[in-house]
Amino acid sequence: MSIIIDKENLIFQLNTPKTSYIMRVFNHRYLAHVYWGKSVKTPDMENASLNRFIGFSPVAKNEYGYCVPDFLCQEYPTGCGSDYRNPAMSVVYADGSRTAELEYESYNVYRGKYRLEGLPATYVEDEVEADTLEIVMRDSVKNLKVILMFCAYNQLDVITRAVKIVNDSDERVILEKVMSASVDYETDEYDFIELPGGWGKERHIERTPLRSGIQSIESRRGASSAQMNPFFAMVGHNTNEEYGEAYGYNLVYSGNFSAGVEVDQLHKSRAWIGINDYDFSWILEEGDSFTAPEAVMVYSAEGLGAMSRTYHKLYRTRLVRGKYRDEVRPILANNWEGTYFNFTEEKIVDLAKEAAGLGIELLVLDDGWFGKRNDDNCSLGDWYVNTEKLPSGITGLAEKVNACGVKFGLWFEPEMVSPDSDLYRAHPDWCIHTPGRERNETRNQLTLDLSRPEVCDYIVEAVCKILDTANISYVKWDMNRHMSELGSAGLPAERQKEMPHRYMLGLYNVLERVVGTHPDVLFESCSGGGGRFDPGMLYYMPQTWTSDDTDAVERLFIQYGTSLAYPTSAMGAHVSAVPNHQTHRVTSLKMRGDVAMSGNFGYELDLNAFTEEEKEEVRRQVAEYKELRTFVQKADMYRLKSPFEGNDTAWMFVSEDGMDIYAGYFRVLCKVNPGIYRMKFTALDPEARYEIVGENKCYSGDELMNIGLVVELHGDFMSKTWRLRKIEKSN
Ligand code: GLA
């Protein structure tokens, strides 16, 4: 059991292999945060949990002593009381009062991990993998119960948190804010790392020192979004990839979120993450409950690299589900950038033939196969095949593609509706809208209102109908606009602010029903590229299209940033044509291949347009990736050189057993009279020898790590990769 409880003093300690997380009940009332960091024995409480008078901050007294809530490090602070810092929870009671004072009531501890009904979350396969602590807090004046859930993994340095609020009173309560986690730190000596971006430039890394006041990230778009990602880290000023403290926070949620840190007057810091309280409220009638999504928290004393590898392993093995969690992912070719909407059945079959000849295993037909869709002006919602374009239907096309020797995949955008569609004409109130106002369109489309069960049922039926009538092995589930003019025709006036979260619950319900009934289909989520790259989507779909920006140089930034929290196996990465359609840059086929092989590999172009010479290179890439994917998709990733810090990027992957290594070095611009560049490997066995596969050379681990290999690259946009195999111990 990784949870230690001092029943007499009410001290709760969660231990993971290398970390401890400690709380205590203070003055028989407050749940105080004591410590989160490197493993420790239970500390002396007088030393660990401080209480002090500060000017202009109220004092709370009871028979056990005094407490200054504005000073105390708290686990789940509430609003409108005596703590002026950012609250984790805000409520409005039936009498209009907003002060909520949570007092410790009881705890419950058990093996295994809690489940969150209707919400995605990390899981265990055996209850020995984790232990759970539930602490019950209560606002006794109003009889509102708050259950704080904490889970400690036994083999990974992961603490997860979630919250359930139960209205035990006989009056209505309105929740206005429910964070999933809040953690107080005694100092502000940290940097804040976030992953902002936009379409085509997702998850770029920004790092700034904490300053007084609030620094925060959030989405108000109805999706986790490309603009911000529900991940941040607090790290020491000197923390780098290998050294120093890193605290990671990630929300298992795909909608509006808010996360941040507040530095107070005493230079203490409060971090939080949860559903955004912007345009949120939730009515709890008598007996009702509300569950906030899971926060995944990772502490590393060994730099950002170790933090990332912990997230990767957790998500790869205990977030992603289904057969493709463990199986290698197919190499696919997608027709989008090859044809856009301009394709015929013959063209798709030709692509399948070409794909088969190149060793590619799956052909994906993207947008434009349904309704009367020949551009992005119409037909979303009308999920029936356009037989003018595809005379054999999807069933017949899939058969023809299969006959070429490749699997068949299909694109859907089920959460959307085009105003020019049969669905919209039949149900104009099924989209998110505000009565009496313009319905502003993005990409000529509106968002279906998934807070309505009948809309969810329609989507499940429409998608399953296609999936069940053709041999479809892969689905790309796209979502290409954010919510606007918020409102639902399915909810009463007083519950309108519940719509954004009800949408997410509806979406998760749809995904469970579609994905759960098609266990052999590989699902990849997408949102104009990587606009919904979050752990919530990964729970249902094991991979995400990382970005519509397929330029090899841009992808260095995007994939490097994404890897801060998300594993290689989650990142769709394709070779596309040059000049690149997003940046107009011309990079070598080799570099495009090398960058894409650091993710889930594929092609996104017209395969028929390759020259014979290019085809040879593609066959080589495909063959190489078939070997690499047996370990790269599950490997530990080490980031060696950051594109955000210079002209060169390098990273490497080490198989779980340490036997296989794949490393890449990428140079953006050529330098005249270049200096000496060396690839210094890491995480090798210094005593062992390694063969450089295909180069007939061997080096010792210590040489590779300390002296490194000279990198000779001439010209712009160049790359060099190495495949290493451990062969022997040197002694
Ligand atoms: C989005 C996706 C693309 C493609 C198009 C189709 O932009 O990100 O990959 O599927 O939609 O319309």
Image (cartoon, rainbow, N blue to C red):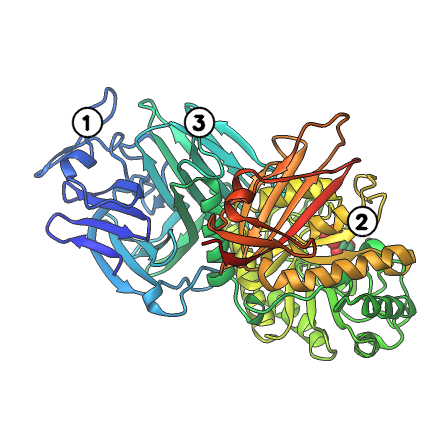
Quarter of the N terminus within the rendering: bottom left
In the image, residue 221 above or below residue 136: above
Residue neighbourhood size for the residue with mark 2, other residues' Cα within 10 Å, grouped as few (<14), some (14–19), many (≥20): some
- Residue 606 seen in the current view: no
Lateral position of residue 104 relative to residue 219, left or right: left
- What residue does disc 3 label? 210
- What residue does disc 2 label? 589
Q: Nearer the viewer, mark 1 or mark 2?
A: 2
- Residue 6 seen in the current view: yes
- Where is residue 65 shown, x and y percent of the image? 10, 35
Secondary structure beneath disc 1? loop
Q: Earlier in the sequence, mark 2 or mark 3?
A: 3
Q: Quadrant of residue 247?
A: top left
**What amino acid is at disc 1?**
Arg
| Residue 163 vs residue 681, the one in the foreground | 681
Secondary structure beneath disc 3? loop
**What amino acid is at disc 2?**
Leu
| Mark seen at residue 604 | none
Secondary structure beneath disc 2? helix
Q: Nearer the viewer, mark 2 or mark 3?
A: 2
Rounded to the nearest angstrom, the CA distance separating label 1 from label 2 is 63 Å
- What residue does disc 1 label? 52
- Where is residue 584 shown, x and y percent of the image? 83, 39
